[in-house]
Amino acid sequence: MDIEADGRFGNKRVHNRLGPGSGGAPPSTNGKVCNYWRAGRCNRFPCPFLHSELPEAAPPKRPTGPGGNVWRNPNTGGRGGGHHNRWGKGPGGGSGIASHKPPERPCKYFLAGTECSYGERCRYPHSYCISDSIAMLTLLKGHEQGVTGIALPAGSDKLYSGSKDGTVRMWDCQTGQCAGVITMGREVGCMIIEGPWLFVGIPDAVKVWNMQTAAEMSLTGPTGQVYALAVASELLFAATQAGRILAWRFSAATNCFEPAASLDGHKLAVVSLIVGGMRLYSASMDKTIRVWDLATLQCIQTLSDHTDVVMSVLCWDQFLLSCSLDQTIKVWAATESGNLEVTYTHKEDQGALALSGMPDAQSKPVLLCSLNDNTVRLYDLPSDRGRLFSKKEIRAIQMGPGGLFFTGDGTGELKVWQWVDLAQT
């Protein structure tokens, strides 16, 4: 066996070397397939390369959703965050993870949606995923521009997605078909669901729908696009392009959301919000993360370790995770004084766009991080668990119950994924 390193992706390809007794190829063959033979114009005799394709390993069995092209949203839980993880000081993590590196990038023609002339003989996988632990259940098409938000109501058979094309689409989980379209008229910046409420951020407003009563309202006050939304302590928070975080409180007396507070401090647009414990964390284009006390709505700490736009923040157990266009993922933990400090920095080769986390089929914690090379990296930091690929950048990642999760990319495509329990396949 010869092992040939591929410098581009750091992976390895293994070829069987044919010896003198293998027939057809001369003893000096180097185990590679002749490119001229593949093109049908090799005139060398004897040719030092193989005039036959190398055998390919059979792909692992993949499960499909019920009916093959749909998925279900079980009523039971399944969100990441309730499972123990090993992220802390030093390199950390990695136990129980396969030591081999993931295979090469999928076929570029397959990813682009064009025909690959090699077909089944292509040396690159025709798949959106390089991982033995994940299966793609279905692809949802309908949006004409990038997906910016995905929301799945607990126990519902509907999935909601928002897009830069100015629409919110409702998808039927039983059929995988679009069941309705809400025209916003403005580019959707984000969306979340909390209880019966669907919140959609658009320029200069937050649109609100009650999915049980069909009541609709518009919350004014934001300046510019609303990039992120969060709910905590009976308050709705909206991160705005102007750098302010606005808060509303629902009033049962008026059956409306009324302005409650404005959290000022960021110098540029706020692009991500996350709630953990009694803290609200905000990430901004000003390269900082601010920590807000939910009891007082005051900023109690500013984190300035990133050197470029902080794109996303995530709370996981006792840790805060952040990713940035400075090509790093940082893990923060509280010191004895209660302040946060960086305990681990993971370096990427591309700018990082969005973070999410969930347990895999064996309940091991997995971090998902999308990069601006159109991939999502899967980690048990610092160990690599695989990669997801798309035509354009993936800005929306949403966890679901029962091992489901969803991604939306810059072309408007949504993909439905599920973790695979290899012990049962």
Image: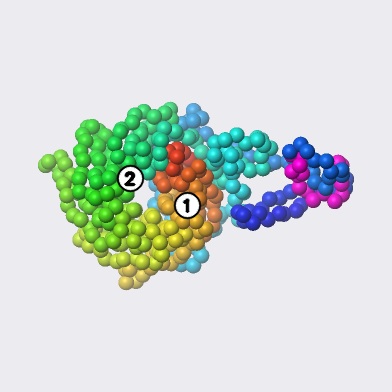
Q: Position of residue 28 (x, y in %)?
A: 85, 51
Total number of numbered discs in the rendering: 2
Magenta span contains residue 9: no
Q: Tell me the tag on residue 2.
A: none
Observer able to see residue 215: yes
Label 1 SS: strand
- Taking the spot 25% from the left edge, 62% from the top edge, the residue there is 265
Residue on which the image places disc 1: 371
- In the figure, is residue 166 to the left or right of 385? left
Q: Main secondary structure of the magenta part?
A: loop
Q: Residues within 10 Å of mark 2 (few under 14, many from 20)?
A: many
- Taking the spot 54% from the left edge, 36% from the top edge, the residue there is 113
Foreground residue, 54 or 314?
54
Observer able to see residue 77: no
Q: Position of residue 32 (x, y in %)?
A: 76, 47
In which quarter of the view is residue 283 placed? bottom left
Residue on which the image places disc 2: 189
Q: Position of residue 296 (x, y in %)?
A: 20, 61
- Taking the spot 42% from the left edge, 51% from the top edge, the residue there is 354
The region drawn magenta spans 23-38
Foreground residue, 151 or 96?
151
- Taking the spot 33% from the left edge, 36% from the top edge, the residue there is 167
Magenta span contains residue 29: yes
- In the figure, is residue 37 to the left or right of 413? right
Q: Amino acid at mark 1?
A: Leu
- Work out which quarter of the rendered image holds the C terminus and state it: top right
